[in-house]
Image: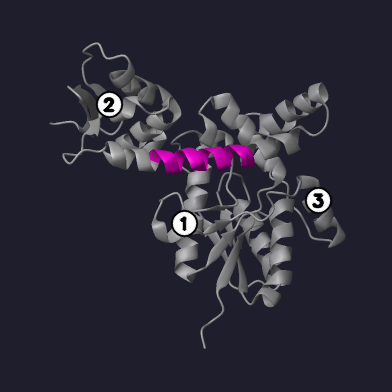
Amino acid sequence: RFPQPLVLVACSGGADSMALASALAFEAPKAGVRAGGVTVDHGLQPGSDLRATEVAERLSSLGLDPVDVVPVDVGRTGGPEAAARSARYAALDTTAERHRAAAVLLGHTRDDQAETVLLGLARGSGTRSLAGMAAVSGSLSGAPATALRYRRPFLGIDRQTTRKACLVQSLPVWDDPHNTDPSYTRSRVRHEALPALEKALGRGVVEALARTAQLSRDDADALDAWAEAAHRAATRPDGALGVAELGALPPAVRRRVLRRAAIAAGSPAGSLFARHIEETDRLITAWRGQRPLNLPGRVEASRQGGRLVIQQASQ
């Protein structure tokens, strides 16, 4: 007889993740899965280790087993929010692999989705950024085996509902002071930008932004699939891309092909910005004999006649 699969819930002790932990504990026996939990101690505040232990005790009292407390060292790369996120997901990945968990549940709500879309809009980084968070996603490593690891079952539920759920069940909730700290961008979006938008445009902004995320995700998925096929069709036997084939593509698809090619050549996705792709695109659309371009990761893009070559720069 095969053991029941294990599903972990990532819990900070806030209302969203506590409500999710309670829901998992209730539903797991009916779904035929084991329910466990993990709380990450970022070590960013005094007493964070004690709070993490308290959260773990609450998870155990709900009947979750195993329950892990994972301390992490938060670096500085990309700013405090990005660094904390990277450390958190790395810890969750490690824990999931150690326990061979089938999935890790995250308590992101519709409000979190709206904030993510608004941040993406402010960055001007395109349709994929506006798509927000996926209901199902893989680890930051991009390993195929983790493609379905993270699940966000509360993306259609607002934050107020999770608070009510905790109140009704008398579940203790810890409010992270970082969530109200104006030095954090997401905190300013939550407490200043979204309320200002609702005041100016009326209620329903959060729902509209979350709906935008789903529509954008559908569009981005379709364009990505088209770009994958176009990339294969434009790639020549020597690995170069055909300029004629690329030039015939709509800009949205062509730029996706160029981004895919740059990443395949070794450019880190997180360092490859829109301006890099726009400059590479000009090698096709505005060719005037430009010199080769230097892209992140020591990748070079050059036009050689009717070929576009994107590869590691020679020493």
Which segment did they paint magenta? 214-227
For this orientation, the residue located farthest to the top is: 288
Residue type at tag 2: Ala
**Quick one: label 1 or label 3, which is nearer the N terminus?**
1
Residue type at tag 1: Ala
For this orientation, the residue located farthest to the right is: 168
Picture quarter with the C terminus: top left
Left or right: where 88 falls relative to 311? right
Q: Nearer the viewer, mark 2 or mark 1?
A: 2
**Quick one: label 2 or label 3, which is nearer the N terminus?**
3
For the residues marked 1 and 3, what is the alpha-carbon distance in whole angstroms?
29 Å
Q: Which residue is mark 3?
A: 161
Query: Number of marks in the image?
Result: 3
**Quick one: label 2 or label 1, which is nearer the N terminus?**
1
For the residues marked 2 and 1, what is the alpha-carbon distance in whole angstroms?
34 Å
Q: How is the image coloured?
A: one colour
- Residue shown at the point (17%, 22%) measured from the top left: 305
Q: Name the one closer to the observer, 183 or 209.
A: 209
Residue type at tag 3: Thr
For the residues marked 2 and 3, what is the alpha-carbon distance in whole angstroms?
54 Å
Q: Would you place residue 150 above or below residue 132 in this image? A: below
Query: Does the CB distance between marks 2 and 1 fall below 8 Å?
Result: no
Q: Which residue is mark 2?
A: 244
For this orientation, the residue located farthest to the bottom is: 1
> In the image, residue 239 lies at what x, y percent?
20, 39
> In the image, residue 19 lies at what x, y percent?
74, 58
Mark 1 neighbour class, 10 Å CA radius: few under 14, some 14 to 19, many 20 or more = some
> In the image, residue 71 lies at what x, y percent?
52, 55
> In the image, residue 32 lies at what x, y percent?
64, 77
Whether residue 77 appears in magenta in the rendering, the answer is no
